[in-house]
C-alpha cells in the first residue's frame, strides 16, 4: 500500500469488525415448529440488483429463533459473499444493509444464507466507507488471490481475506469520502443505466430489420411495388436435412472439429470452446459441412435457443456438427440463397412459430426435422434476395458499430469507477 495521507492509518480488515458470523438458510417457509420464526433470507442472487431492489427477491424461510437473534441484520451491516461465483464472477462481492433494505419486507427480520458472511463494523468505522473500499478491492481483481474451489463454485478464503490492509481515514473524513462517493458514483451509475439500454435497443433494431427484410418492406421501393414472392416451406427448398453426430467429443485438437450448441452464438458460428472427435470416411462424407450450409439448434432447455441458426462460411468447411444440431443444405442457389434463408429463420415471424411449437413442459424444448421442414415464409426472386442481403448487411453493420461504441463506453465507465474509488482511498478525491 502506498504512503497514506496524514492522519490515516492502515489496519487489517479483521480489526475493523465488532462482529462476524456466517448465515443460516434454515428450513422451508412452511416448517411447523414453534421454535422457528419467519425471516427473509438474502442470497448471492440478490447481490446483482441490490441497489435497485434492496433484497426484494430474498426468500421467505423459517430459522430457529435463537439463530435469528444472533443473525438478524441491522443497518450498517456488510454482507460478504464467501461461496459461489464462477470464471467470470469472482467470489467476494459485498453489499451494505441500509434502512431501505430493512423495510423491504416490512417488520420481518432479514438474515443471510450460509454462503454469505455477516460482518458488522466497529463504531469507529463508517460502514459506507468500508463497503466502498471492499468493492474497490473486488473491482481491482485482487480478491481472486483469496479464493479457491472448483471452476464453477468458488470459495473465499475468509481467514486470509480478513488480513487485507485497509486505509482508514479519521471517522469524519470517512463519512465525507463516503458522501462524495455516493454523489460521484451515482452519476456514473446513471450513465451506466443509460448505456445498459443499448443492447435491448439494438436487439429490437435487428429484429425490425429482419421483419422488414422477410416481409418485403425493406425492398418495396427497389421492387417498384411488385409482388414480393410466394410463400414456401423449408421442405420445398431442400430434402437434405440431417441430424448431427452423437459421437463423444473432447479437446484433442489433432482430430476433426465438431460444432456444438455453444458454437451457435450471436447469429453465427462462434469458434470458441471447440471440441473434436475422430470420424471414418463414411461419417465424414455424410456429415462434413460445406460453405452455405445452415445449422439449426434442435433441442435445448431454453426455448430461446431452439431453432437458432448459423450460416456456415468457408472457414468452417470440413467441420462436423453434434447431434443437438440439424444441418440444412440448399441445392439450388439459383432459387434460394442460404444467407436469405438464414435471415428468414431468424425473423420474428418464424421465431414466433418455432418457440410456440418447441415449448415443452418436460424442461427440454425441441424442434425436429419435420417441423423444421414445415416452417414457411415468403421467398422473393434471387435478385431481390441479393438486394435484401446487401441491405441487411449494411444495416447490421451500423448496429455493430454502435455495439462496439457501447462496449467501449461500458469499459471506460468500469475503469472510471475503479479510478474514482482508488483516488478516494488514497485521499485524492477532491
Image (cartoon, grey):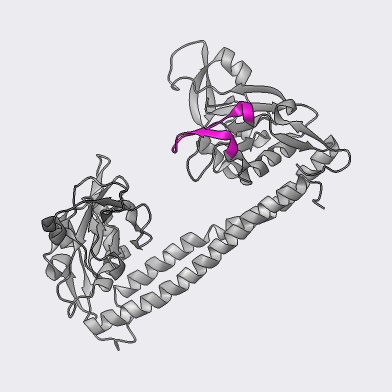
Residue 227 appears in the rendering: no
User: Residue 163 falls in which quadrant of the image?
Assistant: top right
Question: Which residue is pictured at 37% across the width and 79% down the height?
Answer: 391
Task: Give how far across and how far down residue 275 sits, in percent.
Answer: 30, 51
Q: Nearer the viewer, residue 175 or 4?
A: 4
Q: Nearer the viewer, residue 111 or 158?
A: 158
Task: Give how far across and how far down residue 424 sits, in percent.
Answer: 76, 47
User: Residue 175 falls in which quadrant of the image?
Assistant: top right
Q: Quadrant of the N terminus?
A: top right
Outermost front residue:
254
Name above or below for residue 352 compared with residue 166: below
Question: Which residue is pictured at 29% across the width and 74% down the height?
Answer: 215
Horizontally, residue 325 falls left or right of residue 6, namely: left
Task: Give how far across and how far down residue 142 sits, in percent.
Answer: 62, 42
Q: Is residue 159 magenta?
A: yes
Question: Which residue is pictured at 54% across the width and 24% down the height?
Answer: 39
Name above or below for residue 153 compared with residue 351: above
Horizontally, residue 298 falls left or right of residue 178, namely: left
**Magenta residues (range):** 145-160
Q: Is residue 87 magenta?
A: no
Amino acid at each position: 500500500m502506498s504512503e497514506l495521507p496524514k492522519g490515516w492509518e492502515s489496519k487489517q480488515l479483521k480489526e475493523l469488525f465488532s462482529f462476524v458470523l456466517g448465515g443460516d438458510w434454515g428450513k422451508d417457509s412452511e416448517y411447523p415448529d414453534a421454535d422457528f420464526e419467519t425471516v427473509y433470507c438474502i442470497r448471492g442472487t440478490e447481490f446483482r440488483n441490490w441497489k435497485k431492489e434492496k433484497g426484494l427477491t430474498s426468500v421467505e424461510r423459517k430459522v430457529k429463533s435463537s439463530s435469528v437473534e444472533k443473525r438478524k441484520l441491522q443497518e450498517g451491516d456488510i454482507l460478504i459473499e464467501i461461496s459461489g461465483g464462477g470464471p467470470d464472477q469472482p467470489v467476494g462481492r459485498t453489499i451494505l444493509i441500509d434502512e431501505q433494505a430493512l423495510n423491504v419486507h416490512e417488520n420481518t427480520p432479514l438474515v443471510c444464507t450460509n454462503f454469505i458472511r455477516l460482518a458488522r463494523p466497529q463504531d469507529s468505522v463508517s460502514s459506507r466507507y468500508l463497503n466502498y473500499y471492499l468493492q474497490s478491492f473486488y473491482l481491482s481483481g485482487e480478491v481472486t488471490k483469496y479464493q479457491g474451489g472448483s471452476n464453477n463454485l468458488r470459495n473465499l478464503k475468509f481467514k486470509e481475506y480478513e488480513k487485507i490492509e485497509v486505509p482508514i481515514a479519521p471517522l469524519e473524513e470517512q463519512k465525507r469520502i463516503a458522501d462524495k462517493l455516493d454523489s460521484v458514483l451515482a452519476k456514473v451509475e446513471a450513465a451506466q443505466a443509460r448505456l445498459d439500454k443499448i443492447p435491448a435497443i439494438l436487439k429490437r433494431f435487428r429484429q425490425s430489420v429482419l421483419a422488414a427484410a422477410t416481409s418485403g418492406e425493406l425492398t418495396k421501393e427497389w421492387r417498384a411495388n411488385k409482388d414480393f414472392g410466394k410463400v414456401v416451406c423449408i421442405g420445398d427448398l431442400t430434402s437434405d436435412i440431417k441430424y448431427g453426430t452423437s459421437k463423444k467429443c473432447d479437446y484433442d485438437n489433432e482430430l476433426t472439429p465438431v460444432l456444438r450448441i455453444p458454437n451457435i452464438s450471436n447469429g453465427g458460428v462462434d469458434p470458441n470452446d471447440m471440441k473434436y472427435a475422430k470420424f471414418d470416411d463414411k461419417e465424414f462424407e455424410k456429415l462434413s459441412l460445406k460453405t452455405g450450409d445452415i445449422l439449426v439448434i434442435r433441442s435445448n432447455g431454453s426455448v430461446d435457443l431452439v431453432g437458432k441458426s448459423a450460416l456456415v462460411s468457408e472457414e468452417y468447411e470440413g467441420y462436423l456438427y453434434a447431434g443437438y444440431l440439424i444441418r440444412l443444405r440448399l441445392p439450388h442457389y439459383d432459387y434460394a440463397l442460404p444467407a436469405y434463408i438464414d435471415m428468414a429463420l431468424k425473423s420474428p415471424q418464424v421465431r414466433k412459430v418455432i418457440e410456440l411449437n418447441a415449448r415443452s413442459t418436460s424442461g427440454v424444448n425441441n424442434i425436429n426435422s419435420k417441423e423444421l421442414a414445415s416452417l414457411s415464409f415468403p421467398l422473393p426472386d434471387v435478385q431481390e434476395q441479393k438486394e435484401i442481403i446487401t441491405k441487411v448487411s449494411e444495416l447490421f453493420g451500423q448496429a455493430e458499430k454502435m455495439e462496439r461504441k457501447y462496449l467501449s463506453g461500458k469499459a471506460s465507465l468500469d475503469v472510471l469507477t475503479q479510478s474514482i474509488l482508488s483516488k478516494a482511498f488514497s485521499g485524492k478525491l477532491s
